[in-house]
Image (tube, rainbow, N blue to C red):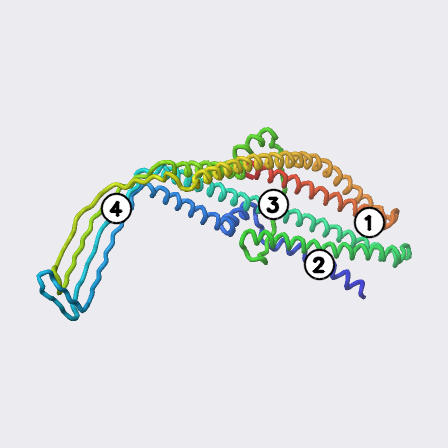
Amino acid sequence: MTKNICKRLIIILILFVGLSGAAQELLTMNQAVEIALANNFDIRIAKNNLTIARQQTRAGNALLLPDLTAGLSTQNNINNSEQELYSGDIRQGSNVKSSAVNAGIQLQWTIFDGFNMFITREKLAELENAGEIYARLMVEDVVYNTVMLYYAIALEQKKLEVIRQSLEISLERKMIAEQKQKIGSGSGLELLQATVDLNTDSSALLQQEYNLLNARTMLNELLAREPDTKFVVDENIQSSNDLTYDKLTTLVQEQNPEIMLARSNLAVERLALKQQRSGLYPSLNINSGYNYQRNTSEIGIIRYGVNNGVYYGLTASWTIFNGFARNRDLQIARLKISNSELELEQTGHRIRSELYRLYAEYLKGAELLKAESKNLDVAEENLKVALEKMNLGTISSLELREAQRNRINAEFRLIAAEYETRMAEIKLRQLCSMPI
């Protein structure tokens, strides 16, 4: 009775795995990338940071323009006052009221500051360029990670199907062992071994279901979707064979975002040195404005007075000595340039080494694909023959299990080779900022 229940549960499990995949929505690669570009939090943050960098560039343009400010102030007083004039007259009063109104417009315009304003504008433009590169790097990272997770799910789905097929064979093997025992041509040991293998495959199926669930959850997180969103992916994994090392070496120098970002950082440090040198020059400012002043008082020499008019002038300044701070700042700026040059060289060396390693992995994967494809054909034929012999009773269940295991391992190796080759290709394209 217990054996029949176990058999029914296994059949239900096999059917559930097959039907659950068929009932779920198919998520295509293009759809996954589109959702990631629209929803991913890192991309949205990077876009906001890019907008900030662009606003700062506009602020740099404003440095070339004058500042114009307007001001207004009023003051009212109530005082007790006593005044003695030179004539000997004395004036005094209680709760004497007086008031003053001041208004004006002031213009300040730096017309020369050792070219600092132009250098600052150029530096902010370079920082905006760095922000654009960083935003592009973030977008590419999200896109490539989406693609890699997508193929990881395809890998887990394929493994699940292989285990499900193996489970079906193990169930058939157990049924054959039961029939042989009933007619007296089989042994209890053979049935027990078939049951153990069936239970092993059932556990492997459950574990693979969890692996698939985990991979789907990771992709949902990247797409900023609810973790329990159900879907299946297209299991077709194909790699291109049009990548050449010479072409990739050229593209990586021209298009790799990390190298471009290191170059941009070097440009910023060089502009920072120019900013320090601008302090060697004098600065010149134009000042102009209009003032209006009105005063009233109930006691005193002047009861009412108004003063208004325009003023203008030039202000020049030149820092001749500041305690050797300028020399220290210039030395620090040169050291920062040296560090940026070393970082650029280091980044280029690391990227070239990564390119070389990934291309070797890409070539190895292409060769493994051919070999594992042939191995799978042989393993499938071997399992087919073993099943026929098992039905005829010419081989033992252990020999069938070995053929079954060889077929599973061969298909797993082929799936892994497909996945690893495609991952190497994707990483190569990411290094060179190429479309997938």
Q: Is residue 5 above or below residue 34?
A: below
Task: Give the CA distance from mark 3 to mark 4.
Answer: 59 Å
Which comes sooner in the sequence, label 4 or label 1?
4
The residue under label 3 is 148
Tell me if mark 4 has few (under 14), some (14-19) or many (20+) residues whose alpha carbon lies within 10 angstroms of its own.
some
The residue under label 1 is 401
Tell me if mark 2 has few (under 14), some (14-19) or many (20+) residues whose alpha carbon lies within 10 angstroms of its own.
some
The residue under label 2 is 13
**For the residue marked with disc 4, what is the amino acid?**
Leu
Question: Element under label 1?
Answer: helix
**Looking at the image, which residue is at 11% across and 66% down?**
90
Question: Element under label 3?
Answer: helix
**Rendering coords of residue 399 (x, y %):** 85, 47
The residue under label 4 is 107
Q: Closer to the camera: disc 4 or disc 2?
A: 4
Mark seen at residue 178 = none
Q: Closer to the camera: disc 3 or disc 4?
A: 4
**For the residue marked with disc 3, what is the amino acid?**
Met
Q: Is residue 31 left or right of residue 116?
A: right
Q: Closer to the camera: disc 2 or disc 3?
A: 3
Task: Give the CA distance from mark 4 to mark 1.
Answer: 92 Å
